[in-house]
Image (cartoon, helix red, strand yellow):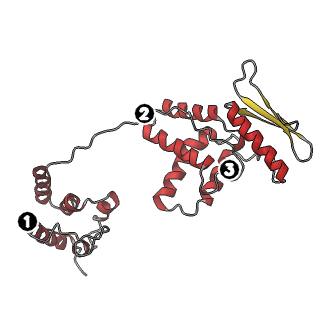
Amino acid sequence: MSQRGHLVKPTGARRTWAVMYRDGDGNLRWEGKFHNRTDAQRRLTSVLGEIDKGTYTRPSSLTFEQFSKEWLAGRRQLRGSTESGYESVIKSQLIPRLGSLTVSHIRFEHIDAAVSGMVEDELAPKTIHNAVMLLRNMLTGRKGPSAFRRNLAFADHTLGVKLPPLEYRQIVPPTAEQVWKLIDVAREIGGVGYPITYLGAFCGLRRAEALGLRFVSVRWFDKLRSAFSTPSRNGGRRTEFTSGSGTSGLRRLEKHCEALRRPRA
């Protein structure tokens, strides 16, 4: 091993590796709690190379809580629900469990303990997976101001963390008879449920679009007609309502949308 640095093997109850080296000013530095010898060797080789190039900087004392705020601010392409979702996971799950740790000292055992805490709190497996994947992106992501790109982290310590198995449920779509029964019942009940059910059956409404139908002042039928008279994304044309029962159904829906409009002053 180089005279300027060497690995420190685990001894006794210690199960983590460490590296010791002298920086450009000759000061002795120590970095510990590497999960295995490979990570420790990688860090030592990297830091000695930085010293030779004159680019070495002392590991930062930046805490994970401070880093997470800077990381969110630096992800300029995040917008809307994605940004809100990331912020929610960071504030509710990651900061309470890792916030006080310095980023450069976060190791496998810290992340593993955080996951164990999420399991004990009975969080959904999907929520735990999302939290760990976000943490991995923050620490070692190739895009944005990740800890790795900022020289605050030197290895991906999320690797090897055991996550709870995801729950998969098979979705069985309704039959055509069931769909028409839903539409007929919605029409009998009246209100905005009828256009929501009808459009959902033929167009596949997303959640935000279905909620938007509550605004009865919007000319939904005009938007529907426009949608089915324009090319689709794959270059084809939408023809669900061009003939047969689709046409009569569209006319019934037009009358219903007219009835939903607010009376003009």
Q: Which SS class for mark 2? A: loop
Which residue has dot 2 on it? 165
Q: CA distance from mark 2 to mark 1?
A: 45 Å
Q: Residue furthest top?
A: 12
The reply to whether discs 3 and 1 touch (Cβ–Cβ < 8 Å) is no
Q: CA distance from mark 3 to mark 1?
A: 60 Å
Task: Give residue 205's quadrant in the image.
Answer: bottom left
Marked residue nearer the N-terminal end (2 or 1)? 2
Mark 3: few/some/many CA within 10 Å (<14, 14-19, 20+): some
The residue under the point 62% across, 34% down is: 108
Label of residue 245 in the image: 1
Q: Is residue 91 visible?
A: no
Q: Which SS class for mark 1? A: helix
85 left or right, relative to 60: left
Observer-nearest of 52 and 24: 52
Which residue has dot 3 on it? 66
Task: Give residue 202's quadrant in the image.
Answer: bottom left
Observer-nearest of 233 and 210: 233
Mark 1: few/some/many CA within 10 Å (<14, 14-19, 20+): few
Mark 1: amino acid: Ser
Mark 2: amino acid: Pro
Marked residue nearer the N-terminal end (3 or 1)? 3
